[in-house]
Image: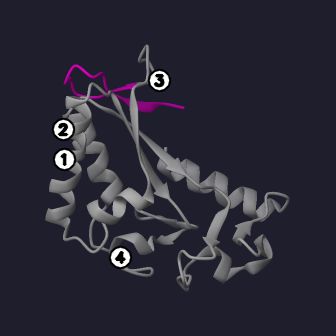
C-alpha cells in the first residue's frame, strides 16, 4: 500500500511505500480540539483555522499532525460507510466540502506529514453524540454492535463490524 508522505523541508509530498521520517514529532488534534477549529465554521473559517494549526506546528518544530477523522462511527470526510460527523455542521449534515482533503493539502503545503486517527469501534459515549445520525452504521444495523453503560461500540467479534472498520480504513488510505 502506498501512502502520501512529505518531509518537513517544505517540499511537496511524494508517494512512498513507507513512512520515512527518522523521528516523529507530532501533535494530536482530537475531536475536542476540532470544536474550535471546525465545528459550525464556514469552509473559509475552517481552512484558516487549520492553516494556523499547521503553521504553529511547524513553528514548534513538529513534522506531523495526527487528526482524529472518525470519532463516533462518523467521519470528517465524505464516506460511503459512515455518516458525516456531528462535529462539523451538526448531526449527519454534509458541510459541502471535504475537511480531510483540505487538512492533507494544508499539512503538505507546510511540509508536514498527516496521519488519520480513527476510533474503529466507538459509536457513541454517554455524552457524545447525544443522538446518532440516521445514516450511522449502528442505526442501520444494530446487530453489528452492543450497548454498555459507557456507550455504544461496534462488536469486533462480528464479521460485519470488522468489514465495516476495514472498508472505512481502506477508503481513507
The stretch in magenta equals 1-15
x and y percent of residue 114 in the render? Answer: 38, 38
Contact, CB < 8 Å: mark 4 with mark 2?
no
Q: Which mark is residue 51?
A: 1
Q: Point out the tag, 4 or 2, that comes first from the N-terminus.
A: 2
- The residue to which callout 4 is attached is 94
Please tell me which residue lies in front, 149 or 169. Answer: 149
Q: Is residue 116 magenta?
A: no
Q: Is residue 7 magenta?
A: yes
x and y percent of residue 146 in the render? Answer: 79, 73
- The residue to which callout 3 is attached is 19
Q: Using the numbered discs, state the Cα–Cα distance from disc 1 to disc 4 in whole angstroms.
A: 22 Å
Local crowd at mark 4 within 10 Å, few (<14), some, or many (≥20)? some
- The residue to which callout 2 is attached is 55
- Residue 14, relative to residue 170: is it above or below? above
The residue drawn where x is 54% and y is 32% is: 1
Q: Point out the tag, 4 or 3, that comes first from the N-terminus.
A: 3
Q: Using the numbered discs, state the Cα–Cα distance from disc 1 to disc 3 in whole angstroms.
A: 23 Å
* Of marks 1 and 3, the one in the foreground: 1
Residue 10 appears left or right of 25 = left
Amino acid at each position: 500500500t502506498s501512502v502520501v508522505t512529505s518531509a518537513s523541508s517544505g517540499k511537496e509530498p511524494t508517494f512512498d511505500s513507507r513512512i520515512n521520517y527518522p523521528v516523529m514529532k507530532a501533535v494530536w488534534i482530537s475531536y475536542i480540539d476540532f470544536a474550535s477549529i471546525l465545528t459550525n465554521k464556514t469552509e473559509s473559517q475552517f481552512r484558516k483555522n487549520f492553516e494556523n494549526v499547521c503553521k504553529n506546528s511547524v513553528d514548534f518544530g513538529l513534522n506531523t499532525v495526527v487528526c482524529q477523522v472518525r470519532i463516533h462511527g462518523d467521519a470528517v470526510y465524505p464516506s460511503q460507510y459512515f455518516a458525516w460527523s456531528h462535529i462539523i455542521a451538526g448531526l449527519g449534515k454534509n458541510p459541502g466540502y471535504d475537511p480531510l482533503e483540505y487538512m492533507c493539502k494544508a499539512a503538505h503545503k507546510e511540509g508536514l506529514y498527516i496521519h488519520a486517527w480513527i476510533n474503529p469501534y466507538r459509536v457513541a459515549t454517554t455524552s457524545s453524540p447525544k443522538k446518532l445520525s440516521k445514516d450511522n452504521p449502528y442505526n442501520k444495523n444494530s446487530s453489528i454492535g452492543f450497548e454498555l453503560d459507557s456507550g455504544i461500540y461496534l462488536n469486533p467479534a462480528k464479521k460485519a463490524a470488522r468489514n465495516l472498520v476495514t472498508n472505512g480504513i481502506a477508503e481513507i488510505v
